[in-house]
Every structure is written in C-alpha cells, then in structure tokens.
Amino acid sequence: MSYKKASKLLPAELIALIQNYVDGETIYIPRRQDRKKNWGAGTTTRNELAKRDNLIYQDFRSGTDIKTLSARYYLSLKSIQRIILKEKRKNR
C-alpha cells in the first residue's frame, strides 16, 4: 500500500474537516464495497497455498503421518488436520 498526499487529492475544505477528527494522524480509508478484491487476487499466494495443500493431502494418502507432515511443512498439527479434511471434502 502506498501513501498519497491528501493536499494533492482532496479539496482544502475536506482536509480541514478531517483535521477536526485526526489532525496529523495516518488513517486508512477502505475501498468501497463494489471495488473490493478477493483475498489473493493480486498475487500468486492463493494458487501456491492450494498446490501446497494438495501436496499435503497426497502425502497423507500415500501413508505419511500427520506429525511428519507437520514437521515437513512447518505447520501445526491442527493446520495439517484442517487441510486434510478440506482436501478430502473437495475430492469427494
């Protein structure tokens, strides 16, 4: 996220009004609902995690135990269990 200078974007009257609430503070103005993007839409993270989860499930199906998967993928036992359950439901 990059910062924009308010004086270059907003009218002086609006800046004065905002200063009544947050004078000199940094604030975040969220996107409008109709312009929001889904998580991971701008990166490859979502696809990478899907591939990793699939590998975990395949390893599990091949006989690798949960403890070993936890150590191999640096995830908690609960996370491994959650991923296996999710992949199992997805592959039905």
Image (cartoon, rainbow, N blue to C red):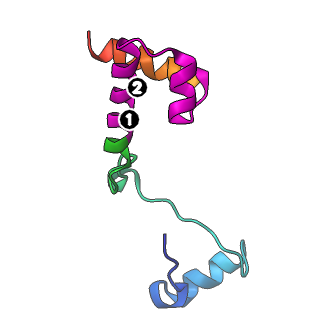
> Which amino acid, mark 2?
Ile
Numbered disc 1: secondary structure:
helix
Question: Would you place residue 12 above or below residue 24 in this image?
Answer: below
Amino acid found under the numbered disc labelled 1: Arg
- Closer to us: 54 or 5: 54
Q: Quadrant of the C terminus?
A: top left
24 falls in the magenta region = no
Image coordinates of residue 26 in percent, x first then y, are 66, 74
What is the crowding at mark 1: few (fewer than 14 residues within 10 Å), some, or many (at least 20)?
Answer: some
Dominant secondary structure of the magenta stretch?
helix
Q: Quadrant of residue 70?
A: top right
From this view, report whether residue 20 is shown above or below residue 55: below
* Residue drawn at the location 57% of the way across and 86% of the way down: 13
Does residue 74 belong to the magenta stretch? yes
In the displayed orientation, state which residue is furthest to the left: 92
For the residue pair 41 and 49, the one nearer the viewer reads as 49
Q: Secondary structure at mark 2?
A: helix
> Image check: 21 left or right of 2?
right
Residue 39 in the image: state x and y as whole percent. 40, 46
Q: Badge 2: few (under 14), some or many (20 or more) residues near its Cα, within 10 Å?
A: many
Q: Find the magenta span and give its range.
A: 49-77
The reply to whether the C-beta atoms of the residues labelled 1 and 2 are less than 8 Å apart is yes
Q: Nearer the viewer, residue 10 or 39?
A: 39
Q: Could you tell me residue 66's position as x and y percent?
A: 53, 17
Q: Is residue 61 left or right of residue 91?
A: right
Q: Is residue 43 above or below residue 3?
A: above
Q: Position of residue 81 (x, y in %)?
A: 52, 17
Q: Which mark is residue 56?
A: 2
Q: Which residue is mark 1?
A: 52
Q: Is residue 26 left or right of residue 13?
A: right
